[in-house]
Amino acid sequence: MGARIYSPAKNPLQSGRGKLGIWVLEFEPQGAKTKDPLMGWTSSGDTLQQLKMTFHSKEAAIEYATKNNIPYDLEEPKPVKRIIRAYADNFSMNRKEPWSH
């Protein structure tokens, strides 16, 4: 029974950064999922897969895991690469790629 501690990425459909900085402790699946013969739905007897705990800091998530003897894997967030451009750069005569319309 292991867990994974990570900080979820920003939703690509939203421009805000409001829920960034939270950390999630999510349990790894213990067994394979099975297919229900009657309905064809995928099911599992592992109820810990449904549990997703959120914390305000990485240290709080690690402290919870160590206090409850839960082995964990820590996944650090990747740094965001930002390309800062001005709108006027779209119309520059020194563009490297051609204007497509």
Image: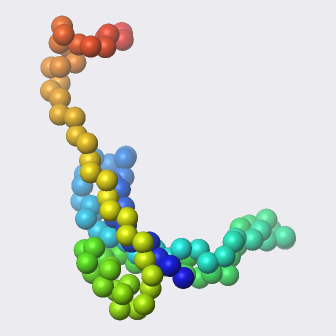
- Give me the residue at 17% from left, 19% from top: 89
Residue at image location 28% in from the left, 73% down from the top: 58
Q: Look at 45% across and 82% down and name the residue there.
A: 71
- Where is 100 relative to 30, above or below? above
Q: Residue 98's spot in the image, x, y percent?
A: 32, 10
Residue 99 in the image, given as x and y percentages of width and height: 31, 11
Q: Percent position (x, y) of residue 34?
A: 75, 71
Query: Is residue 44 rendered to the left or right of residue 81?
Result: right
Q: Where 84 falls versus 60 (above or below)? A: above
Is residue 66 found left or right of 18 in the rendered image?
Answer: right
In this rendering, does residue 56 appear at all? no
| Quadrant housing residue 48 | bottom right
Q: The N terminus is located in which quarter?
A: bottom right
For the question of whether residue 57 can be seen, the reply is yes
Check the image and tell me how it is coloured.
Answer: rainbow
Q: Is residue 63 above or below residue 10?
A: below
Residue 52: % across, % down: 45, 75
Quadrant position of the C terminus in the picture? top left
Quarter assignment of residue 18: bottom left
Q: Quadrant of residue 73?
A: bottom left
- The number of numbered discs placed on residues in the rendered structure image is 0
